[in-house]
Image (tube, rainbow, N blue to C red):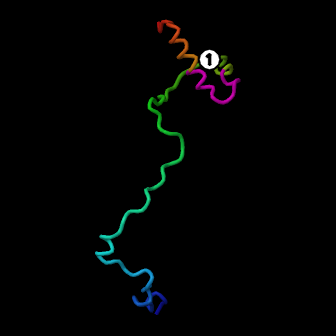
């Protein structure tokens, strides 16, 4: 006979952690909500992912400024629009 077969239900009883009855479940309350995932907060106006083909000179120019080069391209394009340039 294995050790698992020899073990009785009495061996599992823990007086400090008894089996719950219906009354205990009714009195129970929920714990703290799970923590939110870490990271950047949701934006009210999120950017959209896209694919765009740019000349090597343009990419080199913006990448030379370090991190944030895609954001700088976005800002340059928004400034171009704000200046009233035609899209055609």
Q: Is residue 72 magenta?
A: yes
Q: Main secondary structure of the magenta part?
A: helix
- At horizontal 63% and vertical 25% (from top left) the residue drawn is 69
Query: Could you say whether the residue bearing mark 1 is in a helix, strand or loop?
Result: loop
From the top left corner, tell me how far across and down residue 86 is, in percent: 48, 6
Seen from this angle, which residue lies furthest right? 64
Q: Of residues 21 and 65, which is closer to you in this image?
A: 21
In this image, 53 relative to 15: left or right?
Answer: right
Q: Does 74 appear above or below 14?
A: above
Residue under the image location 47 percent in, 34 percent down: 43
Please say if 7 is above or below 22: below
In the figure, 37 relative to 44: above or below?
below
Residue 81 x, y percent position in the rendering: 51, 12
Residue 54 is situated, as x and y percent measured from the top left of the image, at 59, 19
| Part of the protein shown in magenta | 62-74
**To which quarter of the image does residue 23 belong?**
bottom left
Residue at 68% x, 19% y is 61
Q: Quadrant of residue 73?
A: top right
User: For residue 86: magenta?
Assistant: no
Crowdedness of circle 1 by 10 Å Cα count: few (<14), some, many (20+)? few
Q: Residue at x 53, y 17 (%)?
A: 78
Q: Position of residue 6 (x, y in %)?
A: 45, 92
- How many marks do you count on the picture? 1
* Relative depth, front residue between 21 and 3: 21
Residue identifier under label 1: 55
| Residue 38 vertical position relative to residue 9 in the rendered view, above or below | above
């Amino acid at each position: 006979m294995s050790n698992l077969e020899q073990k009785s239900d009495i061996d599992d009883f823990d007086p400090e952690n008894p089996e719950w009855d219906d009354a205990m479940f009714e009195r129970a309350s929920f714990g703290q909500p799970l923590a939110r995932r870490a990271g950047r907060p949701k934006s009210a106006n999120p950017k959209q992912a896209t694919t765009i083909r740019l000349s090597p000179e343009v990419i080199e120019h913006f990448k030379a400024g370090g991190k944030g080069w895609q954001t700088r391209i976005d800002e340059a394009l928004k400034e171009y629009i704000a200046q009233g340039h035609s899209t055609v």
